[in-house]
């Protein structure tokens, strides 16, 4: 009976973790930024240093989650169709040619939300559940 209970507990934990790992990602800007929505292609261009603003808005400074985080991996995989190795190669090329620098990386969701909430020209991505007052969601990253 005890083995059955342990297997059930592991199954429940597995379902919870798999749901958390595939949670919706939200692209956020400061609540005062003049754009209320943007398409994922425009957002990808900002994060890949191909553009520095969204249509109808001012200059944006992208902020990344920490290197190696699952959120960062999901974001670039879904928005830019690039895995971490491809992103490293992409940034190496841009840095070498002087055409760009990767976004500043900070800790996790709370760090990104706080940074964006306190800086009117920043853009970041977090789990949807981390969004709070001071920021607004301009897009959801497709699953």
Image (cartoon, rainbow, N blue to C red):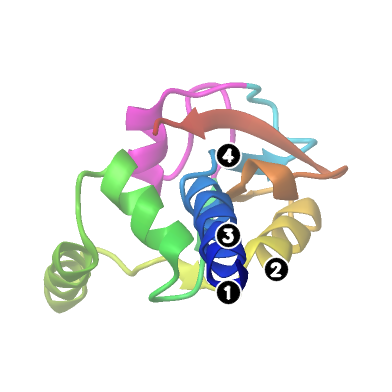
Relative to 115, does residue 22 appear above or below in the rendering?
Answer: above
Query: Between disc 3 and disc 1, whose residue precedes?
Result: 3
* Callout 1–callout 2 Cβ contact below 8 Å: yes
Q: Secondary structure at mark 1?
A: loop
Q: Which residue: 49% across, 74% down?
A: 66
Query: Spatial distance from mark 3 to mark 1, Cα to Cα?
Result: 28 Å
Query: Spatial distance from mark 4 to mark 1, Cα to Cα?
Result: 16 Å
* Callout 4–callout 2 Cβ contact below 8 Å: no
Considering every residue shown, the one lying at the far front of the view is: 1
> What residue is shown with label 2?
111
Query: Where are the magenta residues, as a range?
Result: 37-59
Along the line of sight, which residue is nearer the eye, 79 or 115? Answer: 79
Query: Between disc 1 and disc 2, whose residue precedes?
Result: 1
Indicate which disc residue 106 carries.
Answer: 1
| In this picture, residue 131 sits left or right of residue 13 | right
Indicate which disc residue 129 carries.
Answer: none
Quadrant where the C terminus is found in the figure: top left
Query: Spatial distance from mark 4 to mark 2, Cα to Cα?
Result: 14 Å
Q: Which residue: 35% across, 60% down?
A: 73
Query: Spatial distance from mark 2 to mark 3, Cα to Cα?
Result: 27 Å
Label 4: few (<14), some (14–19) or many (≥20) C-alpha neighbours in 10 Å? many
Q: Position of residue 15 (x, y in %)?
A: 52, 49
Indicate which disc residue 13 carries.
Answer: 3
Query: Between disc 3 and disc 4, whose residue precedes?
Result: 3
Q: Which residue: 24% across, 67% down?
A: 84
Q: Nearer the viewer, mark 3 or mark 4?
A: 3
């Amino acid at each position: 009976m005890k083995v059955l209970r342990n297997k059930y507990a592991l199954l429940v934990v597995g379902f919870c973790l798999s749901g958390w790992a595939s949670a919706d990602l939200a692209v956020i800007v400061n609540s005062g930024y003049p754009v209320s929505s943007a398409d994922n292609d425009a957002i990808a261009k900002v994060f890949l240093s191909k553009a520095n603003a969204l249509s109808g808005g001012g200059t944006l400074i992208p902020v990344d989650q920490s290197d190696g985080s699952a959120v960062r991996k999901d974001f670039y995989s879904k928005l830019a169709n690039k895995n971490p190795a491809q992103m490293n190669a992409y940034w190496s090329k841009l840095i070498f040619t002087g055409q760009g620098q990767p976004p500043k990386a900070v800790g996790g969701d709370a760090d990104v939300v706080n940074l964006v909430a306190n800086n009117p020209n920043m853009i970041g991505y977090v789990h949807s559940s981390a969004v709070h007052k001071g920021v607004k969601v301009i897009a959801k990253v497709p699953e």
